[in-house]
Image (tube, coloured by chain):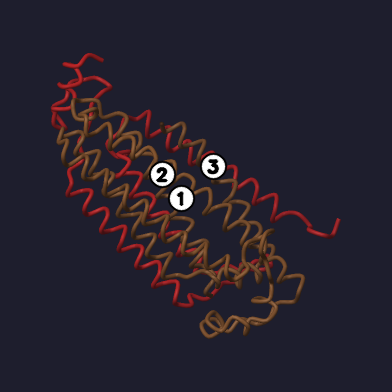
Amino acid sequence: MWLFLLTEVMFFGGLFTAYLLMRNWYYPAFVEASHQLNIGWGTANTAVLITSSFTMAMGVYSAEMRRRGALVLFLVLTFILGLAFLGIKTIEYHEKWEKYHIPGIRYSTSAFTNPQSDPEVYKEYHDKPLPPDMASRTEMYFFLYFAMTGMHALHMIIGIGILGFMIYKAKNDAYTTGHVTFVENFGLYWHFVDIIWIFLFPLLYLISRY
Amino acid sequence: MSETKANIDHTHKHGDEPEHDHEHHIVSPMVYLSIVLALLFFTGITVWVSYIDLGQMRLFDTGFTLYWNPVVALAIACTKMTLVVLFFMHVKYSTKLTKLTVLSGFFIFLALIGMTLSDYVSRAWGRW
């Protein structure tokens, strides 16, 4: 399982490196584009995901202690928290759609060439207008935003699917008779996805305030 | 591994397991609880710090400027990751082989990023 996770580190690592280089390259565009993200939603999602990691860890513990009821309960809680994370992500994606911030499909740079056209963000950050060529680079920020959070969300969706399968199996005592390996390995996967978000959150939401 | 063997493995408490590779440390819920509280605490800290301007530092005459906000945010993220890896992912209680696997993974990852960045910063962009 760890070897699989290491390949995942390399996979997400490529995205993180791309973000790092592009952010240095098109710094003003990346700063203003990230001002479009809502720190409140991001913080809420971080809390949700960290709590889901805790319930998953407790699920592994319940399997080790052979408590079927507790195992099912913690798996269901993890399942629900995973769905809550995706729900909040959907709200955020929907906002991007409404504001024409979907790169390649529905995109407008007007919020960056004329920041005052977006009063909510403007009153918080007072961004200066970007020249058109730099403003067009904000699309690269949103491309990486969707690539990274989208890949992360895909991992969540796969994880939630496996959780559903595990809840069904756990009810039939599949993991509470000494065979904890599957639950344990899934736990590793779920915590890994949590770690990815622990880095995505500051990089995408927080570091561009100053 | 037979059913009985597995049973023996999982009922052993830490410290009295026999000499074999299948020792299985069960982490107590209190550890998990304190870790999740620490993680939520660090999340609050990192959001709070992001609202404070920590300033910047010129890196001598290299032409690079170091901004402190991202540095602090990433340091907190690394701390959180370490907590998750050590306790939620049980690496602290795992075999040397697992520890070595995890460490070498991070090492390779950092080496790859480091080499990419050293190439990036040492090029005369647009001037060749």
From this view, report whether residue A3 is shown above or below residue B22.
below
Where residue A202 sits: x, y (%)?
A: 47, 62
Q: Which is more foreground, mark 2 or mark 3?
A: 2
Where residue B42 sits: x, y (%)?
A: 34, 62
Image mark for residue A192: 2
On-image quarter of the C terminus of chain B: bottom right
Q: Amino acid at mark 1?
A: Ile
Real-space Cα separation, disc 3 to disc 1, in angstroms: 14 Å
Whether tag 2 and tag 1 are in contact, CB under 8 A, the answer is yes
Give the chain of mark 2: A
Residue located 34% across and 48% down the image:
B84
The one of B97 and A203 positioned closer to us in this rendering: A203
Q: Which is more foreground, mark 3 or mark 1?
A: 1
Say yes or no: labels 3 and 1 on the same chain. Answer: no
Q: Which residue is mark 3?
A: B109
From this view, report whether residue A122 is shown above or below residue A60.
below
